[in-house]
Image (cartoon, coloured by chain):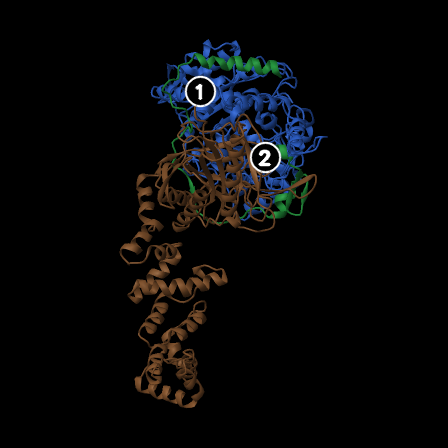
Chain colours: A blue, B green, C brown
Amino acid sequence: MAEPLQTAAALRAALDAGRESAVGLVDAARARADAVDPALRALLHPRWDAAREEAAASDRRRAAGEVASKLDGIPIVVKDNIVQCDEPATCASRILEGYRSPFSATAIERLRAAGAPIVARSNMDEFAMGSSTENSAFGPTRNPWNPECVPGGSSGGSAAAVAADIVPLALGSDTGGSIRQPAAFCGVVGMKPTYGRVSRWGLVAFASSLDQIGPIARTAEDAAWLLDAISGHDPRDSTSLPEPPLETTNALGTDVAGLTIGVPQEVSSLGGLAAGVRDRVAEAVAVFEAAGARTCPVSLPHTRYGIAAYYLVCTAEASSNLARFDGVRYGHRTEGPEGGITAMYEYTRARGFGDEVKRRILLGTYALSAGYYEAYYRKAQQVRTLLRGDFERAFAQCDVIAMPSVPEAAFRIGEKSEDPLSMYLADVFTVSANLVGAPGISVPCGFDGRLPVGLQLVGPALADARVLRAAHAYQQMTDHHEQRPPL
Amino acid sequence: MTRSLEAILDHAADLETLDTSGVAPTVHVLPLPTPLRPDEALDTVAPEAAVANAPQAEGTAFLVPKVLDSEAEG
Amino acid sequence: MSQPAPPAYETEHEVVIGLEVHCHLRTRSKLFSSAAVSYGDAPNQHVTEVCLALPGALPVLNGRAVELAIRAGLALNCKVHPTSVFARKNYFYPDLPKGYQISQFEEPLCTEGFLDIDVAGGTRRIGITRIHMEEDAGKSIHDGAATTLVDLNRSGVPLVEIVSEPDLRSAEEVGVYLRTLRQILRYVGASDADMEKGQLRCDANVSLRRPGEDRLGTRREIKNLNSFRNAEAAVRTEIENQAERLGAGGRVVQATVGYEADAGRIFVMRTKENADDYRYFPDPDLIPLTVPESRIDEIRKALPELPGVRCRRFVETLGLKDEDARVLTASRELADWFEAAAAAHGSAQTVASWTRRDVLGALNDRDVEIDAVALAPAAFAALVKMTDEGRVTPRNARDLLGEILFEGGDPEALVRERGLEAVSDAGELEALVDAAIATNPRAVASYASGDKKSLNFLMGQVMKQTQGKADPGSVREILARKLGG
């Protein structure tokens, strides 16, 4: 039986050296999943046989000297809101029971062109709405570090799959922190790229102006490979940046001597910051300083309005994006006893959507309604402009901003389910990057007790390479990312 | 549900205290030229595939419960 | 002394009508999806992920639709805005797959235009409030007792919505406005505007008020008028109904209504005190539409001459009568064809009367348009010229025209091949007339005793001898002389 999987870089070396085959890697992933996933529930809809065939094709390519890319033969898991042709896509919701997509997301097409076998889809909060993966219609995923705790959300399944060594790479999506927060909770690397960097064609929309697909991996280097492979302009997405695919892996180095790290003053004053998190992040910043980086205090004065702005914008856009789930053309349908189309809409959506989704649709509808649009949605959009100003001024003084990814480490399953507001408030460090379109990455920077803590690095829009470089350099100087959960 | 909604709206009321006069709302985070598509016809989903996921279909049309007169949208 | 009674609505009222016209733009593919624009197909033949609103699908704007919408805006004298924003109009309906329609709300493409219409007694200027772009919905087919079928072929087809100021004052004006609008949209190639295909639909807002009053009365909206005739009839009926009710001292209740053409009846669809809340917001999947002024100018310069201008030029420069000019500029294709023929011939008036009588007559008979004509304008001009010069008799020319109008052909060659050259040589004609007189003594006698119609009989004989090629005017003159009438 194969060893637990390692980084994508290590696996690629093994493949190139002939010590491993792609088929062997898929088999090992399956064996690992069989061993740990019944308890974790990170995976939905595994496709081992199909992945094995894709792996066999990869091995044939390698034998013929025609390796497709750095990712050729590396098994990967994708979040269940990124559609793949002829595969189910449920977004962890009952309303998409039985749905098979007739097309693939651009990110999936690029992965397939790169030769990475997709072994399974991963569990998530329903329609990406949540910070714990407890809102899945298929049951929660558990944190590999402590099965009583949440893995974070909404990309909890992807983060757990990588943390548990089922696969070295995964795709998630991030609207208000849904990649960075679970990466922090699970002790792995998770990045939300600049808005528009990765095509949203095929990503089931939650909040269109905030959503991005991004990589989850053990290392920043692996994440960089994955981001390079899926990034680049896509004419099918009108919000796609007119830029070619990234080549960030060329830019990775270890030197941080010229780097200035901004530390926002507002972080410590925001309530709820756990001491363990505060200390790990301070230690991480000190590591940079010891290696020659400068730090400087910066101010992001509008940070405290970020949560309100986020929850008004994302729910408003979601209330509109989710209107298509009406039981007419696909997915679940329940008719009302009185007959007629309106009853069908009501029963279908009442049955098909979970509570959190319903809550957000109600909020969003309200935020857009006549008489409230100005005070809520439009106001929130103005807050985004103010936040962009904050970040512009901060980046005039520093290269990247460092702060915690999350105010605390993973909480217990069920702990926050009765108090959605407290769940929302914990997004305070991640939402600003989405609201302003900036790239942000979470890297493991130690533990609070036995639970991982994440350091977040945020850069100006378009500075994805810079952020990855800083994260990679940090990982050359530390070994937090090499810790393994006791599974 | 109602309680949680009220709590969230109370928090959102925080924004009222913020002066945003003269601030343009962010419609898009990055200034981009309008992407335009050439006018070339290409149907990408066959009729049978279009209804393949439908809970109910008749031939290649979607079948739904009747729209009652009172529900008619102009 | 009592005040004079206020004027009765039935006899004295001012009618206030505003129209919202939805018009399909003449593109090959849909507004935000590449699916083909096509009519009359089986359900869901032309769809993409975007039209079906599949999870993960995204809209991308059709550049040609933008160009055609701008043409329409410029042709209707609007301000075309360099920046406009697409907004989502949110509501649930089975033929609206996304649960919202992508339209334009606070920042439309065009505002503040006008359309001049010809009415009895002159021209009236009808204001155009705005023109915006939006996508059409699919079709709900209410066939079963308990079920509805949904076809998304039409879902996503590009539309412009043209909203007029409430400047129209009668059902007749509604008809003229719609016909003029259609003509202009066809002239600039923005739309084929064929109401039968559903490419042009109209909603009418109708209210009445006392003459001289500033405030608008309560209005009712007549939806989905799908022919010019129905639009006029519906508006007329609605005016009558409102006048009757107000005249009897009642109130008009705001409502959305429809028109049943067969019964000639207005029926209520719904009464709403409050407007639907569509929760408009800028579509975050789309970038605001920016069109540089230079591009708007480019489109403006490339616009063809508009019908009103061309009609005036036909009168002032080509010397046509008003009525002829109007008929011949009804469509751009016809005006182009006519003008080319007139240029080849040299006399616009002559070509005009031939065109009206023979070409348009033939088109009407077959119920087709000028695009069915295969005969080149220059060839038509040549045939007319040959007739002017007496080289072919008018009768033979028109027969020949009937043959080649829809098939095409070279009149000069055909006349030669078939020996249709007119007989006009005086000596030859004299001889033929003498022969006819000689062989028809009874007709001659008849004529001499007062039956003038016998001359026609004798003419007929001469024409028969010449297979219709004798110039009838000359023959008649010679006969009359020889018979001494």
The residue that mark 2 highlights is C269
Residue type, mark 2 in image: Met
Badges 1 and 2: C-beta atoms under 8 Å apart? no
**Residue C319 image offset from top left, x and y in percent:** 28, 58
Say whether residue A218 is visible.
Answer: no
For residue A44, the mark is none
**Residue C21 image offset from top left, x and y in percent:** 46, 41
The CA span between labels 1 and 2 is 37 Å
The residue that mark 1 highlights is A379
- Helix, strand or loop under label 1: helix
- Helix, strand or loop under label 2: strand
| Residue A183 versus residue A249 in the image, above or below | above
Q: Quadrant of the C terminus of chain A?
A: top right
Q: Are marks 1 and 2 on the same chain?
A: no
Residue type, mark 1 in image: Lys
Q: Quadrant of the N terminus of chain A?
A: top right
Q: Residue at x 48, y 22 (%)?
A: A373
Residue situated furthest right in the rendering: A337
- Lateral position of residue A36 relative to residue C20, left or right: right
Q: Quadrant of residue C248?
A: top right
Considering depth in this image, is C251 or C302 the residue closer to the camera?
Answer: C251
